[in-house]
């Protein structure tokens, strides 16, 4: 992954029970342009972003990233390590804050910039709100501002997961979710990328390192997500984030809401929105034409 001579992989303690895996990659370019904090989405891990790390280091950036608690090779939360679980997004935010304070500020070279995807972009927005002045700019791909779901259905689902958690079912999968079985994942039915080779590469990574696998979400994870969406939806929350932001939306996204991303552009103080028509949710793992458009937008913005 990247130039291994310039790679650091380590672990840090988030609390007594949680260890977080993190990675750092130094550019070999003489013209150093700063450090990019790369925040991945739900179910993702460091190895998935091998191309993105290379793209950034070739541009003269150092890169730092971490596996969120409950996924990748960081500590899992439940006895069934496949279950997507978090008590609250405050835990993600605490982990990110600890990572920035302990690793980024100790080892990384400024200026600091953020590149964050989906759930990682959501947590990133919360961090930027609570820690003004720490980062120079932020690029968000398919950010989880809200889920892609009709409002009426979302209202019913929120009430359901709240009741399920209240009844003690927080650690159970939501209906229809289950363990990850990479051998059964089919490219034809996937909602994440139109690139078969990249899709199969991710499957291969999980087959070769089964500990990376993560299944569907639990009731508690989904309730935590809805509650954190409510936080960033509060009046003046996004308006108080005062740094340049680029949102790159996937035009064919069935995971997160395009409408919510457009609304966020209007609420953020300095924000540009670029929509990649026909792209699926995982823009950085998409086919080359979409990735090329992304990097053009990134280079013009950053």
Image: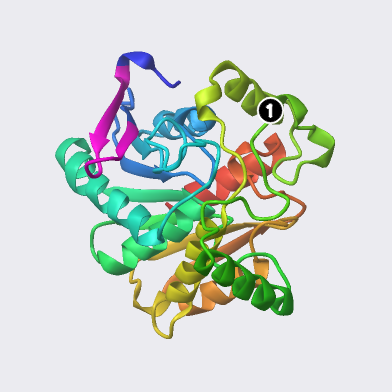
Q: Is residue 124 left or right of residue 261?
A: left
Report if residue 173 lies within the magenta region: no
Farthest residue in the right direction?
188
Above or below, 207 against 43 in this view is: above
Residue that carries the numbered disc 1 in the rendered image:
182
Above or below, 77 against 181 in this view is: below
Which residue is rendered at x = 49% and y = 49% of the image? 85
Give, as a single range, the part of the protein colored magenta. Answer: 6-22
Question: In the rendered image, is residue 301 in sight?
Answer: no
Above or below, 148 against 191 in this view is: below
Res. 7 image quadrant: top left
Q: Nearer the viewer, residue 244 or 45?
A: 45
Farthest residue in the bottom direction?
235
Q: Is residue 242 left or right of residue 86?
A: left
Q: Nearer the viewer, residue 31 or 153?
A: 153
Which residue is rendered at x = 51% and y = 33% of the image? 49
Q: Give coordinates of residue 98: x percent, y percent.
A: 23, 48
Above or below, 168 against 264 in this view is: above
Assign the N terminus to one quadrant of the image. top left
Element marked by disc 1:
helix
Question: In the rendered image, is residue 231 in sight?
Answer: yes
Q: Nearer the viewer, residue 146 or 160?
A: 160
Res. 206 image quadrant: top right
Report if residue 12 lies within the magenta region: yes
Q: Give coordinates of residue 17: x percent, y percent.
A: 28, 40
Q: Is residue 270 left or right of residue 103?
A: right
Q: Give coordinates of residue 183: x percent, y percent.
A: 73, 24
Dominant secondary structure of the residues highlighted in magenta in the image: strand
Which residue is rendered at x = 18% and y = 48% of the image? 101
């Amino acid at each position: 992954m990247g130039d291994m001579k310039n790679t650091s992989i380590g672990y840090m303690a988030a609390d007594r029970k949680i260890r977080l895996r993190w990675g750092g990659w130094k550019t070999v370019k003489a013209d150093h342009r700063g450090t990019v904090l790369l925040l991945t989405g739900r179910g993702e891990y460091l190895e998935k972003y091998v191309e993105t790390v290379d793209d950034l280091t070739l541009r003269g950036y150092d890169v730092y990233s971490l596996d969120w608690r409950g996924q990748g090779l960081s500590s899992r939360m439940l006895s069934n390590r496949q279950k997507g679980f978090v008590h609250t997004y405050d835990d993600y935010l605490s982990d990110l804050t600890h990572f920035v304070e302990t690793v980024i500020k100790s080892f990384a070279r400024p200026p600091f910039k953020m590149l964050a995807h989906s759930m990682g972009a959501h947590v990133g927005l919360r961090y930027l709100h609570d820690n003004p002045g720490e980062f120079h700019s932020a690029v968000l791909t398919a950010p989880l501002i809200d889920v892609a779901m009709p409002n009426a259905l979302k209202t019913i689902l929120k009430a359901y997961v709240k009741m399920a958690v209240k009844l003690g079912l927080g650690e159970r999968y939501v209906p229809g979710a289950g363990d990850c079985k990479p051998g059964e994942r089919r490219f034809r039915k996937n909602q994440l990328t139109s690139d078969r080779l990249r899709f199969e590469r991710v499957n291969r990574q999980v087959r070769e390192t089964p500990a990376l696998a993560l299944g569907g979400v639990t009731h508690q994870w989904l309730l935590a997500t809805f509650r954190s969406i409510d936080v960033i939806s509060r009046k003046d929350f996004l308006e108080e984030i005062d740094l340049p932001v680029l949102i790159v939306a996937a035009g064919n996204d069935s995971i997160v809401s395009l409408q919510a991303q457009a609304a966020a552009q209007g609420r953020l103080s300095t924000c540009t929105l670029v929509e990649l028509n026909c792209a699926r949710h995982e823009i950085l793992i998409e086919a080359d034409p979409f990735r090329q458009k992304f990097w053009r937008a990134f280079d013009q913005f950053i």
